[in-house]
Image: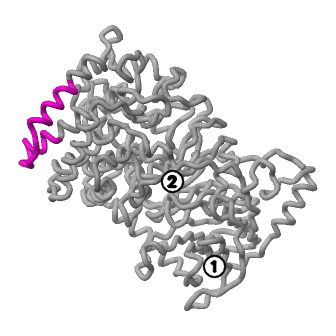
């Protein structure tokens, strides 16, 4: 029996489009395969897992076999994808979306996920092929599929059930394709078993059953499929009208972004980035996930693979500030209310991240049956970093809530009381070492950026009292702020290096130091900051002037292997250049970074300059936040000329 795994997914990340219904997200490849979808939430177990394995780990392929994709785009200001296929004989338009319509008749926990795929032959004739493979629970649960009719409309369809999950497919009829037969075919061709239930290295893998179809189309023909997730104990749901769902979904996205002006490429990317932030937000709770994916590698073939489908206080806080800057105060308030609910209770229980609804337990596990994206293993679900102490987090929360106050949003009794509790938490942990913004898995340290954010937390408390008339122990907060300032200048700045350092007592620099001006500790054009930037340029820039987070070879993070340059850090450098008078350098770097976006304007966490590929979880909220802030900083630079 063969022991080698099937080839894992090699579709470049930039070839994927994001679909979103503001509860979950799907990744759709350029060639028409939905390779990742979790239902009904971003952090639910996946029903399509080919992103982290292969087709038999679940996917939905809809393609024109003898055609070529000549165009794809998002319909303006939406997450509806339109793909144009060209063949020798005709032209086909495929429209893909997650319906964003609210299902008001269903309780929140039972809300449905609807994937809609519409195919229209717009010219000549063409053949369309369909291959749907469902494997629930991250590829571990083979469904039972049978023909049924929906609840009240009696629409015929195929119902796939496993455990608590069900998917109901309606549309042109598909035929079951025997997984056993496909396994036998592979064994005959390859000389060994590659079936999920018989691979020695992944005993939990399940066998996918395929639903296939071949459709000959002529000009004017339209085919429509709808795949609806629902709780398996409920009846198969009635399908909704595809044209109405498309129209309503488009209107919802368009209305939200209607006030944003777009005049050039950078402003297009700002618009798409703001839309990404909304797309990665759970509409019901307000929790924003860092990315809709897990275990997309920071180093192809390596072990730095993490689950980002949770809400970090840091990310939520930066999002609040960005939304306020772009007149989305209502949206920012939604995020603030999530944040306040998540951290409510004993302030000593504050975590760095939570589940989408504020869940606290995010235990990390490894899925050994999945081969990993480009054989990057292990595949992880959950994130053990939730139990870390990171000293910067409360400072970022206080900066974000200060931005809301400055924008005219009044504090209520609950929100201000909670902020005072957060400052008490900072005070009680004043001498505690942490793991830093990058969630180092080595020993705890005094990270300079983290200490500066503690300074910022107390500084914003003082400002709330002095500038907004709120009540609090301003004398004590002022004293603690001043103490931290003196400490950072003594232990976090190296006179010989002429630079702030990553941690107290070492000589390394860290990209997070580029954020020191946001804390109020030091100005962007202060000589100490300029010296730090020079050191970062010397130690952390790659051959394309992209910024690494830190030198992994220094060994502080406690992890094997390396990682690529981080887009967020590179955008931070643009912001620093813009605010310190280096307008031309900022503009040049920004132009380069914009070129690393996918054709649909999406960014991953990292960029591999060597291969010219996006890497890490995708799309990444942090990267899109960084782009918006960098463009804002450049727009505020008097000598910056837009392209």
Mark 1 packing: few (<14 Cα in 10 Å), some, or many (20+)? Answer: many
**Residue range corresponding to the magenta coloring:** 461-485
Disc nearer the start of the sequence (1/2): 1
Residue 547, visible in the rendered structure: no
Tag 1 residue: 170
Tag 2 residue: 292
User: Which of the pair 307/277 is nearer the observer?
Assistant: 307
Image height check: is 137 above or below 245? above
Q: Residue furthest top?
A: 496
Mark 2 packing: few (<14 Cα in 10 Å), some, or many (20+)? Answer: many
Residue 42, visible in the rendered structure: yes
Residue 632 shows which numbered tag? none
Choose top left, top right, bottom left or bottom right for residue 634.
top left
Separation of residues labelled 1 and 2 (CA atoms): 26 Å
Choose top left, top right, bottom left or bottom right for residue 305.
top right
Evaluate if marks 1 and 2 touch, with contact meaning CB atoms under 8 Å apart. no
Queried whether the magenta region covers residue 50, the answer comes back as no
Instruction: Report the predominant secondary structure element of the magenta stretch.
Output: helix
Where's the C terminus, which quadrant?
A: top left
Q: Position of residue 215 (x, y in %)?
A: 74, 73
Q: Position of residue 531 (x, y in %)?
A: 32, 16
Query: Helix, strand or loop at disc 1?
Result: strand
Image height check: is 478 above or below 422? above
Q: Position of residue 559 (x, y in %)?
A: 56, 31
Q: Is residue 22 left or right of residue 87?
A: left
């Amino acid at each position: 029996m063969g022991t080698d795994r099937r080839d894992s997914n090699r579709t470049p990340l930039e070839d994927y489009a994001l679909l979103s219904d503001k509860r979950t997200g799907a990744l759709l490849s350029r060639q028409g395969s939905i390779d990742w979808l979790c239902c009904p939430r971003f952090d639910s177990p996946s029903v399509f897992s080919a992103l982290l394995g292969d087709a038999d780990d679940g996917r939905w392929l809809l393609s024109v076999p003898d055609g070529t994709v000549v165009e794809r785009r998002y319909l303006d200001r939406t997450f509806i994808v339109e793909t144009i296929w060209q063949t020798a004989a005709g032209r086909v338009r495929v429209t893909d979306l997650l319906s964003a319509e609210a299902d008001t008749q269903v309780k929140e926990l039972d809300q449905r996920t609807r994937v809609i795929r519409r195919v229209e032959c717009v010219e000549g004739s063409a053949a369309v092929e369909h291959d749907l493979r469902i494997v629930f629970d991250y590829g571990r649960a083979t469904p039972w599929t049978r023909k049924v009719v929906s609840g009240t409309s009696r629409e015929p369809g195929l119902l796939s059930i496993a455990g608590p999950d069900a998917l109901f497919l309606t549309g042109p009829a598909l035929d079951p394709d025997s997984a056993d037969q496909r396994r036998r075919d592979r064994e005959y061709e390859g000389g060994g078993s590659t079936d999920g239930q018989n691979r020695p290295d992944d005993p939990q893998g399940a066998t996918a059953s395929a639903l296939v179809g071949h459709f000959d189309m002529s000009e004017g023909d339209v085919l429509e499929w709808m795949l609806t997730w629902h709780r398996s104990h409920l009846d198969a749901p009635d399908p909704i009208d595809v044209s109405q769902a498309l129209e309503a979904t488009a209107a919802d996205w368009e209305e939200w972004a209607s006030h944003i002006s777009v005049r050039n490429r950078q402003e297009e990317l700002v618009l798409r980035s703001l839309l990404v932030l909304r797309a990665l937000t759970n509409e019901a709770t307000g929790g924003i996930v860092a990315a809709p994916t897990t275990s997309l590698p920071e180093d192809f073939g390596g072990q730095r693979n993490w689950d980002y489908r949770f809400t970090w206080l840091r990310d939520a806080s930066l999002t609040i500030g960005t939304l306020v800057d772009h007149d989305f105060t209502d949206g920012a308030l939604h995020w603030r209310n999530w944040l306040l609910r998540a951290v409510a209770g004993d302030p000593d229980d504050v975590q760095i991240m939570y589940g989408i609804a504020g869940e606290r337990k995010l235990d990390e596990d490894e899925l050994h049956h999945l081969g990993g994206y480009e054989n990057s293993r292990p595949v992880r679900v959950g994130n053990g970093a939730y139990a870390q102490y990171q000293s910067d987090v409360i400072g970022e929360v206080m900066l974000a809530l200060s931005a809301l106050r400055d924008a005219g949003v009044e504090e209520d009794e609950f929100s201000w009381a909670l902020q005072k509790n957060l400052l008490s938490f900072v005070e009680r942990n004043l001498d505690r070492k942490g793991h830093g913004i990058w969630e180092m898995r080595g020993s705890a340290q005094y990270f300079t950026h983290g200490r500066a954010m503690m300074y910022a937390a107390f500084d914003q408390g003082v400002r709330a009292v002095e500038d907004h008339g709120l009540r609090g122990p301003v004398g004590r907060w002022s004293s603690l702020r001043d103490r931290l300032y003196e400490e950072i200048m003594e232990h976090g700045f190296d006179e010989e290096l002429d630079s702030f350092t990553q941690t107290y007592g070492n000589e390394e620099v860290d990209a997070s130091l580029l954020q020191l001006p946001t804390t109020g500790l030091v100005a962007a054009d202060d000589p100490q900051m300029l010296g730090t930037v020079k050191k970062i340029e010397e130690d952390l820039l790659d051959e394309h002037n992209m910024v690494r987070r830190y030198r992994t070879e220094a060994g502080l993070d406690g992890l094997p292997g390396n990682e690529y340059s981080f887009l967020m850090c590179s955008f931070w450098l643009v912001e620093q250049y813009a605010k310190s008078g280096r307008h031309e350098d900022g503009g040049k770097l920004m132009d380069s970074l914009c070129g690393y976006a996918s054709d649909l304007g999406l960014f991953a966490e990292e960029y591999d300059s060597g291969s010219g590929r996006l890497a890490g979880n995708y799309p990444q909220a942090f990267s899109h936040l960084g782009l918006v802030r960098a463009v804002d900083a450049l727009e505020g630079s008097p000598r910056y000329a837009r392209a």
